[in-house]
Amino acid sequence: QKEVEQNSGPLSVPEGAIASLNCTYSDRGSQSFFWYRQYSGKSPELIMFIYSNGDKEDGRFTAQLNKASQYVSLLIRDSQPSDSATYLCAGVNTGGFKTIFGAGTRLFVKA
Amino acid sequence: SQTIHQWPATLVQPVGSPLSLECTVEGTSNPNLYWYRQAAGRGLQLLFYSVGIGQISSEVPQNLSASRPQDRQFILSSKKLLLSDSGFYLCAWSVGEQETQYFGPGTRLLVL
């Protein structure tokens, strides 16, 4: 059973702090990884994707991938109350159309 | 730019009634299309995906079915709804292999 695991949270951080969201996956064939943000009652929206080992930065967001450890993370710098949402981690393997989603981590940013 | 539409936005149906949810994509050709269900407080469960007209792959055996009558149209159906069919139904599209999936606004279904 191919799985993507996330701590359900909630993760609570003060405004302006760094939020660190983590994800592990079981399928070593997974090649591409995605982070989505989902506000309550809304559909997921893409934040970032990462294919290569290392860090990828986009504004306040940094995705990190370590394929040897089967670990993906998302750092949110200068967290804002508007970042409060559920963050979904997802992975897809080579040649596949089946993206496996984690159950998500709820993040609360306190003003 | 690409746009994905789903309707209806919300739906309340009695147990045993039929279902038809529609998803259309604009601004792209030959997309891969997906139906997901998200139960309250749970992750996304892939129900069906399609790589072309008339090509449907089912991931979870259940009382739901999907059809793709046109390149950018994806329909989710049921002949008889169950209580367990309640949830948030999301349509998504992507292009190519391993490419990013983009989600529609979703349909919230409550079966009573």
Image: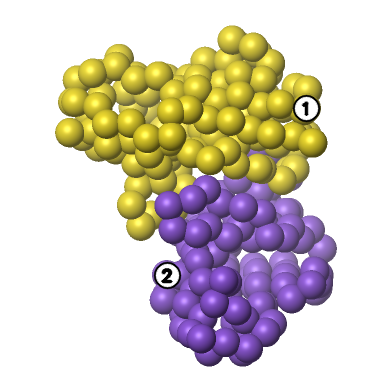
Residue B55: x and y in percent read: 61, 16
A32 or A34: which is nearer to us? A34
Q: Circle 1 sits in a helix, a strand or a loop, which is it?
A: loop
Residue B70: x and y in percent read: 64, 12
Q: Can you say which quadrant of the picture contains the N terminus of chain B? A: top right
Q: Name the kind of residue labelled 2 in the image.
A: Ser
Q: Can you say which quadrant of the picture contains the C terminus of chain B? A: top left
Q: Circle 2 sits in a helix, a strand or a loop, which is it?
A: loop
Visual hue assigned to chain A: purple
Residue at numbered disc 1 = B28
Pinpoint the chain carrying mark 2: A
Note whether B54 is above or below A43 in the view shown.
Answer: above
User: Of the numbered discs in the image, which one, if any, rests on residue B78?
Assistant: none
Residue at numbered disc 2 = A8
How many numbered callouts? 2
**Residue B7 seen by the camera:** yes
Note whether B63 is above or below A97 in the view shown.
Answer: above
**Residue A2 seen by the camera:** no
Q: Which chain is yellow?
A: B
Residue A37: x and y in percent read: 58, 60
Q: Name the kind of residue labelled 1 in the image.
A: Thr
Pinpoint the chain carrying mark 1: B
The Cα atoms of the two marked residues, 1 and 2, are separated by 35 Å
- Do discs 1 and 2 share a chain? no
